[in-house]
Amino acid sequence: MANVIKIKKGLDINLKGKAPEVLLNCGKSETYAIVPDNYTGIVPKVVVKAGDKVKAGSALMVDKNRPEIKFVSPVSGEVIAVNRGEKRKVLSIEVKPEAKIEYEDFGKKEVSALDAESIKGILLEGGMWPFIKQRPYDIVANPADAPRDIFVTAFNSAPLAPDFDFLAKDEKENLQTGLEILTKLTAGKVYVGVKKNASSLNGMKGVEVVEFEGPHPAGNVGVQINHIRPVNKGEVVWTANATDIILMGRLFNKGVADFTRLVAVTGSEVKECGYVKAISGCTVKSILEGKIDPNAHLRIISGNVLTGMKVPFDGGYLGAYDCQVTVIPEGDDVNEFLGWAVPGFNKYSVSHSYLTWLCGKKKEYVMDARIKGGKRAMIMSNEYDKVFPMDIMPEYLLKAIISFDIDKMENLGIYEVAPEDFALCEFVDTSKIEIQQIVRNGLNLLYKEMN
């Protein structure tokens, strides 16, 4: 029987636009792209040029500092552009797909017959390594490290998040293979965090399943690490999402880099919510065309509303780690009389400023992307503590990051956290501070300082 850990602090934001368990049609993506900004802790080096022919699984770029880490094409076709920005920063590598996908053949593998180094080599060559991240720093894991433990989260508690049981319904074999791969990569344990009473991990072998109950961010792997076995200075643990573990298992079972996944189409501005079968790196236009009003003032997000990335309808791509696309009102065409002072019977408020809290937790809200305020000094009001379920003092840690006091950052738990762990703090913050960016900057600076 799995251990059950109950999370008391947190916040479930009940938004309109959940995805029912139905499959919708997905349009044809005219191009696919790898976006280096999706991957943290790497310096991209492009290894192809416009006009090159590639297969699904062919390397498009590598990490300049660790060239064994490859980032591969999700489809076969022709490289049509290597887009660069200021100082020749690589923005994206675009591939025009062929009518039928041709895969690089990596060969089917039996995990039980392989050692850790052989498995690492296959994951690196097949482009699956970037799905493994590490704490501290929340970056793409270093293959040379030996992790103390590996933590996998098998559910997502964010607003409108897809149901992992549905995502993994037909992928049990690949999921088991993926978990078996991870057990070979550590001398410690592989912990898998699941939602209480979830069925997706039933019968899975070789891992320790831990059930979590409670509000968001119970599904964050950082919260799960903090409650199972925290990270101390000098220790390295690896993390992964179970949806990405399925892709790793597919590489070994089929011998190909198949990035096909189910993607939840969610949000109040979507005409028909549900799931589509898509390939990572496809255009969001192919997913959303016919499902939204392209002329409306909309915010399209690859991911969830708290941690996702804003993408345009034309020219935007599904993020490498994302199984969700969310569409909400932008809010830039809204002009309210008296603004926040209006009673607002359909407005959401964490502090019960509006009477809508009397409607109960089942009421669904339509929220737009407005900040509704300007930046102010950080207020030490303990509002972060109410939604931050880790054994860390968030306000003091943030101040240490801003002042870049390394000793205080270490003592206050910087090695355990990632920006996503502070997403709710940013949501409830009355000072409108970009907390996730502060944490990301702090981790980046600390990584440079320590390495």
Image (cartoon, rainbow, N blue to C red):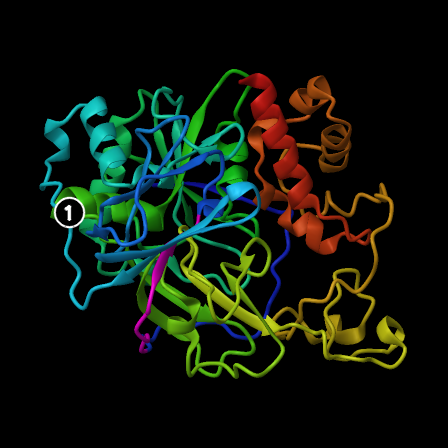
In the shown orientation, is residue 279 left or right of residue 160?
left
| Residue 358 versus residue 155 in the image, above or below | below
In the shown orientation, is residue 336 left or right of residue 232?
right
Residue 243: x %, y % from top left: 34, 51
Q: Which one is in front, 197 or 415? A: 415
Residue 338: x %, y % from top left: 90, 77
Q: Is residue 309 visible?
A: yes
- Is 28 included in the stretch rendered in magenta? yes
Q: Which one is in front, 302 or 323? A: 302
As helix, strand or loop, the secondary structure at mark 1 comes to loop
Residue 94: x %, y % from top left: 36, 56
Residue 228: x %, y % from top left: 48, 32
- Is 22 included in the stretch rendered in magenta? no
Look at the magenta stretch and give its main secondary structure.
loop
Q: Is residue 196 visible?
A: no
Residue extent of the magenta highlight = 25-35
Residue at point 34% right, 75% down?
A: 22
Q: Which image quadrant: the N terminus?
A: top left
Q: Which one is in front, 47 or 390? A: 47
The amino acid sitting under disc 1 is Glu
Residue bearing the label numbered 1:
104
In the shown orientation, is residue 409 left or right of residue 38?
right
Residue at point 72% right, 79% down?
A: 333
| Residue 50 versus residue 292 in the image, above or below | above
> How many labels were placed on the picture?
1
Q: Which quadrant of the view contains residue 295?
A: bottom right
